[in-house]
Structures are given as structure tokens and as C-alpha cells.
Amino acid sequence: MNMPLPDSIANKPDIIAGLEMYWQAFTDLNTSRELGMAEGPIPWTAIDQWATRHRIVGEDFDRLVIILRGMDAAYLKHRSKSSNKTLGKRPKKPSTGKQSIRSK
């Protein structure tokens, strides 16, 4: 059963060597964001805990924060655009097969 890969996987972008750590940090920390009316940013405290666990300090920590904040801003912007496309669209009601009283 050989199915073709989805386009998003077949044409995935390459991560530049040396930047894998930032992608790993982002994917690890993505689950720490608060959810309310919308997704919130990754909390600074979560970034700090991740960096401490991975022994990232000083200028390396500052760089990590700057890069993650940029990645997070792009992610939230993308998610906001995606959710705005679905606003105002009502989900279709499932058909029960029963006739409405009003239609009789």
C-alpha cells in the first residue's frame, strides 16, 4: 500500500545545520502555552526552564529567547489567519433522517 506523501511532508523545508536546537525547543515548548479565547505566547518561564534543563546560559540564552519569540510570533500569526478563515462558517448539522414538524 504505497500512498504518496502529502505535499507538506514531501516538500518540507530543510532546517539549516546548527538550528535544530531552536526547532526542538519550539516543538517542546509549544505545549506550554496558555489557551483561552485564543492561543497565548509561550511563557518566558517555560523558555527559562527549558534552557536551564539544557544548560543554556548567558548570551546563548538571550539568543534562544529572541529566536523563540520570533518563531512564536510567526506561529501565532499563522494560527490567527487560519482561525479567521473559519469564523462565521457554521458547521453543518448532521442529518437525523427525521422530518421536521414545521415541514409537515
Image: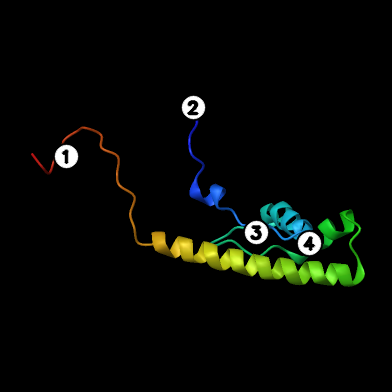
Helix, strand or loop under label 4: helix
Name the residue that disc number 3 marks.
Answer: 34
Q: Nearer the viewer, mark 3 or mark 4?
A: 4
Mark nearer the viewer, 4 or 1? 4
The residue located at (87%, 68%) in the rendering is 60
Q: Nearer the viewer, mark 2 or mark 3?
A: 2
Name the element at disc 3.
Answer: loop
Q: Secondary structure at mark 1?
A: loop
* Quadrant in which the C terminus is drawn: top left
> Label 2: how many residues lie within 10 Å, few (<14), some (14-19) or many (20+)?
few
Identified by mark 1, the residue type is Ser
Is the C-beta separation of discs 2 and 4 under 8 Å? no
The crowding category of the residue bearing disc 3, from other C-alpha atoms within 10 Å (few below 14, some 14 to 19, many at least 20), is: few
Dividing the picture into quadrants, the one containing residue 88 is: bottom left
Number of other residues with Cα within 10 Å of mark 1, as a class: few under 14, some 14 to 19, many 20 or more = few
- Taking the spot 70% from the left edge, 69% from the top edge, the residue there is 69
Tell me where residue 21 appears, x and y as whole percent.
78, 57
Rendered image quadrant of residue 71: bottom right
Residue at the spot 72% in from the left edge and 61% down from the top edge: 16
